[in-house]
Amino acid sequence: MAKTENADLVRSLTQLSERLRGAQRELILSAARSGQLPPENMIRRISDLENTIVAVETLIAEEK
């Protein structure tokens, strides 16, 4: 892969990671504000986002 293509890919992956982290953060803050145990589907979504973040971060590390 050409150097500029690689840099563009890393930039895109980094932006995706930031969006995923933001979405996860909002879910966690929402759960914290509720003062109750979050519903199971929210816990699952937070977990799914974490797994996706890890996968994206792994790709970023591989592309650098």
Image (cartoon, rainbow, N blue to C red):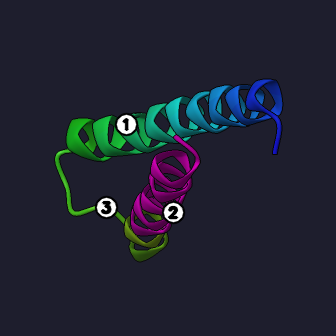
Residue drawn at x 24%, y 35% is: 33
Q: Are marks 1 and 2 in contact (CB under 8 Å)?
A: no
Residue drawn at x 21%, y 63% is: 37
- The residue carrying mark 1 is 25
User: Based on the displayed image, in which of its 4 quarters is residue 46 positioned?
Assistant: bottom left
Which secondary structure lies at badge 3? loop
Which secondary structure lies at badge 1? helix
Mark 1 or mark 2: which is in front? 2
The part of the chain drawn in magenta is: 45-64
Q: Is residue 63 left or right of residue 54?
A: right
Reply yes or no: does residue 15 show up in magenta.
Answer: no
Which percent across, then down, holds residue 38? 31, 61
Please tell me which residue lies in front, 61 or 40: 61
Which percent across, then down, holds residue 30? 36, 38
Give the amino acid type for the residue marked by disc 2 in the picture: Ala
Give the amino acid type for the residue marked by disc 3 in the picture: Pro
Please tell me which residue lies in front, 43 or 54: 54
Residue 12: assigned label: none
